[in-house]
Image (cartoon, grey):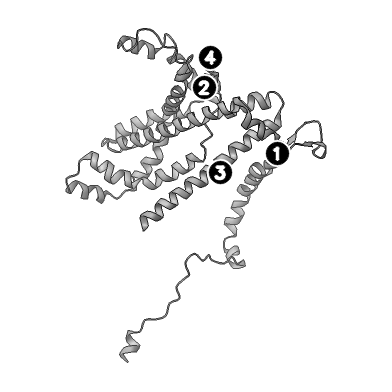
């Protein structure tokens, strides 16, 4: 009798990693969601997958006047030209350098600004600073580059301030010397996007349990220690996800800012892969070369995205162990 009373009822545990089978009843119950996803699916297929057919141009000497069957197939001829061309290797160096600079500066400044905004107790000041910082995001790069060019001119405000502080003796031609160009592009990206990038981090900080801050304060932690030991660990998953997504765009250094700020004096430092494709591919009618450059960017981006995701998973598994 006692064994019967103490015996626990049998409950079938679901197997780990096993998905729920797709049945007609499940499809019927979720038919509204399925119909809602049809326009999005059609959009993705039409604008993301159908254009992949155009990648065949990279393996042809493509002539717009000829039909597909009449095109001359040349294999990896255009890819070989890219990797053996000194100009392409130069623009690849520029693209990687400016992309890494934008990535590092963008992440560091956005996280630091979000931490500082989170410490502001007065809501009015916090919202005022946040609004002012993300307003440049809504300006086009045409306007931003005009502001940057005027600010960095020989008689611009930057040179005036540096000369009045006796840091320089004569005006610096910021946009005429190549070794300054990458820094100018990085600073322009930070000024334009830092406020906008902090929004996600501030949203992640709002989900941190206030009890953690109270416990840290009881233990004698200062505001800086709470930032490093409570706030930063609390937004770490968000930082990792955004970092993975950003690494996937490692060859997206930009086009507008380099094209608008660049000139003949800094061309060796300003050209990116996008400008190279426009200049040597589309402008000269060599669409096969332009397509080969685009495929190279896509392959590198997907590879870096998978690699970053794999690294993040490995680090997570090691921590669990």
x 49%, y 20%: residue: 145
> Which numbered marker is on residue 269?
2
Q: Which residue is mark 3?
A: 302
Label 4 SS? loop
Label 1 SS? helix
Q: Is residue 263 visible?
A: yes
Q: Which residue is mark 1?
A: 54
Q: Which residue is mark 4?
A: 265
> Which numbered marker is on residue 45?
none
Label 3 SS? helix
Earlier sequence position, callout 1 versus callout 4: 1
State the CA–CA distance, disc 4 to disc 3.
34 Å
State the CA–CA distance, disc 4 to disc 2.
9 Å
Residue placed furthest toward the front:
84
Residue 232 falls left or right of residue 72: left
Q: Quadrant of residue 124?
A: top left
**Residue 124 higher or lower than 7, as above or below:** above
Badge 3: few (under 14), some or many (20 or more) residues near its Cα, within 10 Å?
A: some
Quadrant in the picture for the C terminus: bottom left
Residue 59 falls left or right of residue 259: right
Earlier sequence position, callout 2 versus callout 3: 2
């Amino acid at each position: 009798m006692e064994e019967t009373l103490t015996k626990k009822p049998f409950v079938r545990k679901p197997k780990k990693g096993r998905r729920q089978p797709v049945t007609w009843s499940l499809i019927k119950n979720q038919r509204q969601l399925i119909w809602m996803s049809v326009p999005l699916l059609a959009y993705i297929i039409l604008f993301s997958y159908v254009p992949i057919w155009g990648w065949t141009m990279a393996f042809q000497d493509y002539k717009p006047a000829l039909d597909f069957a009449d095109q001359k197939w040349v294999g990896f001829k255009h890819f070989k030209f890219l990797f053996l061309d000194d100009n392409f290797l130069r623009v690849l160096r520029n693209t990687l350098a400016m992309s890494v600079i934008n990535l590092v500066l963008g992440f560091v400044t956005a996280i630091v600004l979000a931490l500082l905004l989170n410490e502001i107790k007065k809501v009015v000041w916090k919202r005022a600073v946040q609004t002012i910082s993300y307003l440049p995001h809504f300006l086009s790069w045409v306007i931003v580059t005009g502001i940057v060019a005027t600010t960095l001119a020989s008689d611009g405000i930057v040179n005036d301030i540096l000369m009045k502080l006796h840091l320089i003796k004569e005006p610096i031609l910021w946009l005429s010397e190549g070794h300054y160009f990458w820094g100018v592009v990085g600073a322009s990206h930070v000024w334009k996007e830092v406020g906008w990038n902090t929004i996600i981090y501030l949203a992640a900080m709002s989900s941190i349990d206030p009890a953690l801050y109270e416990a840290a304060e009881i233990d004698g932690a200062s505001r800086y220690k709470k930032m490093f030991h409570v706030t930063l660990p609390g937004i770490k998953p968000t930082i990792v996800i955004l970092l993975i997504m950003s690494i996937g765009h490692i060859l997206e250094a930009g086009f507008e800012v380099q094209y608008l700020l660049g000139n003949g004096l800094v061309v060796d430092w300003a050209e990116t892969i996008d400008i190279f494709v426009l200049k040597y591919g589309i402008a000269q009618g060599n669409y096969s070369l332009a397509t080969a450059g685009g495929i190279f960017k896509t392959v590198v981006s997907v590879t870096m995205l998978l690699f970053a995701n794999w690294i993040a998973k490995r680090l997570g598994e090691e921590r669990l162990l």
